[in-house]
Amino acid sequence: MYVNPYENLTGGRWLKANFHTHAGTGEGTCGRWPIDFVLDLYKKLEYGAVCISNHDLYTDTTALGDDSLCMVQGVEYSTDEHMLTICAGKSLHGLPHQEAIDEAARRGGFTILCHPNWIRDKYWPLDKISELNGFIGIEVYNGLVTRYKGSGVATDTWDAILKGGRLVYGFGSDDYHMPFDAGRSFTHIYAAEPGEEGIKKAVRAGRFTASTGIGLEEFVFENGALRVKANYLKETYVETFKYRFVTENGIALETEGKSASYKLNGERYVRAEALAENGMLLYTQPLWRA
């Protein structure tokens, strides 16, 4: 049986979220820009959720949210390889990675491994990842690293984990440091309920994509085939995208059109990517064989 994370999306709405944002820690730090400035910028970019996740510092922003922007609480754990500990209510730095992941979960939160290919290939070594349990996903696209050191794309790490039999999700993050970082990449979440709790439920169910500007219109599995259709998050007459289906065996199909379909043949998983004419990307979560 295959599990489709996007099955029966009703009664909610899609919202843009950035879980990796540095702000409010002063000149000479990653978060040099004031929090109110950064939040105003994200509101103008029509984000529905933002997390101020400074290095090893919990910043309580619950009072800064409003009807248009949900403030999700989080910290960037920066002991050796970095992680985002979301909705844990405190910084968990100083703990070993596994203990921090466990404590975040105990507190009702979740953990995302940050920029797996930052600075060098396999900044997050696969053998170390294999020793960890309980993290919910990785940053499959980190906007800061695309302009910085290393590679901001981590589909290689993602597929290695999936191929090994572990279902983890792919997130998109700005890793905001400067104003021009905003809007480079986001996690596009289908939330059936408002607020932080609704976001947590959607994330745990995999009801989101990683995107640099493309939405997901269809992700339908029926009669043994997966059909995917992307769309722009703006008004346009352009409907054609390049599609790619990826399984544990690598790229299974590349095609172009208004939508695309792939007939499965017992694969452990299949995930889809879409590429727009302007270079924008979309990464779906995998259809997973339970």
Image (spheres, rainbow, N blue to C red):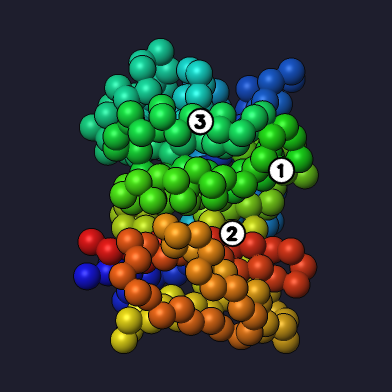
- Residue on which disc 2 sits: 211
Q: Earlier in the sequence, mark 1 or mark 3?
A: 3
CA–CA distance between discs 3 and 2?
Answer: 22 Å
Pointer 2 and pointer 1: residues touching (CB < 8 Å)? no
The image quarter in which residue 254 lies: bottom right
Q: Earlier in the sequence, mark 3 or mark 2?
A: 3
Dot 1: what SS?
A: helix
Element on which disc 3 rests? loop
Residue 58 image point, x, y percent: 46, 25
Query: What is the quadrant of the C terminus in the image?
Result: bottom left
Q: Mark 3 — residue?
A: 124
Q: Residues within 10 Å of mark 1 (few under 14, many from 20)?
A: some
Residue drawn at (50%, 69%) of the image: 252
**Amino acid at dot 2:** Ser
Where in the figure is residue 187, as x and y percent of width and height? Answer: 52, 54
Going by the numbered disc 1, the residue's amino acid type is Thr
Which residue in the protein does label 1 denote?
Answer: 146
Q: Residue furthest top?
A: 94
